Image: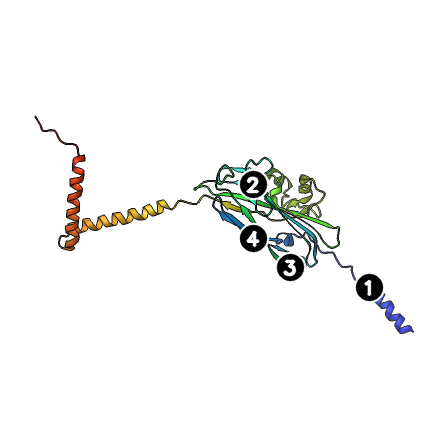
Amino acid sequence: MRAPALALSFLLIATLLVPAAIAEDFAAIGKVNKLIGVQETPELAPGESGRFVFYFNSTYTEPMRNVRLNASIYRYATIDESVPVDSAWPYAYPRIAETGTKEWVWTNATVASGSSRSLSFTVLTAPDSHDMPHGSIFSQSSYFLRFWLEFDGNVTGNLFRMVSPGFFTRAQWLAATIPEADPCNLPNCRGHLNVTMLAGFLGVSRLDGIIPDSAFGVKEPIPRWPFYLLIALVVFFLFLAFLFWVEENPGTFPRIETWWARTRGRIARTIAPLRPQRRPKA
């Protein structure tokens, strides 16, 4: 009886000495910045539609539960201007086909650890500049997308929240940036950002990380007629150069030389009445 009791005692002691498993850090920067991987961003002419395709990657060893991902169009920009796409946006486009608005939402009860799935939505544009601005031939325009991600990790009810930089103004972002010489400790900071301050700007109790923004382009296509006109002019002047060479080298191409002489005569007779007649000198 002593041997089993002694073995049980050693087992209990070993169990007490083994450190408790540390919960996974769902807010680790190396994991957060890989949650979303953009695969295809459309470059559209006004009036076209295109698919925005990206991967949602679970970078964790534990499952993500009650996942809710929101993507929204939030800014229009060209070289010359940058305008927020918000409640004051006066245009009906661009919009997301699946929702008919400028926002798209994806939810999932459980995302398995280490999994990756392809997600997409369709962006709609308008051909008329009265329905949406789209820059010009010489000015590429872009519409920026931002993401808002929430999920439960470790145990249900432990909410994690990650957002894109597009939810903050430039002044807010700069205010929350931590100088390298003045580091900030967890949980208030991640990397060189004070996430507690950023959460305050959003009016939420907690912010766990920053996920990347994205964008798609809308630009009027360059007209093709100048290109074709240039080709036609090049061919025309090459042909003229050949005729002048034939004229300077008589007998090389007699048929072409005869045709060119007749053609020049016809042209001269055609434009002769158009020339102003010289008055005889008194």
- Picture quarter containing residue 9? bottom right
At label 1, counting other C-alpha atoms closer than 10 Å, the crowd grade (few under 14, some 14-19, many 20 or more) is few
Query: Which mark is on residue 53?
Result: 4
Question: In this figure, which residue is indicated by the disc labeled 1?
Answer: 15
Of badges 4 and 1, nearer the viewer stands 4
The amino acid sitting under disc 4 is: Val
Q: Relative to 156, say whether 85 is above or below.
A: above
Q: Which is nearer the eye, 80 or 261?
A: 261
Q: Is residue 189 left or right of residue 9?
A: left
The amino acid sitting under disc 1 is: Thr
Question: In this figure, which residue is indicated by the disc labeled 3?
Answer: 115
- At numbered mark 1, what does the secondary structure look like: helix, strand or loop? helix
Residue lying farthest to the top in this orientation: 282
Query: Which mark is on residue 75?
Result: 2
At label 4, counting other C-alpha atoms closer than 10 Å, the crowd grade (few under 14, some 14-19, many 20 or more) is some
- Picture quarter containing residue 19? bottom right
The amino acid sitting under disc 3 is: Ser
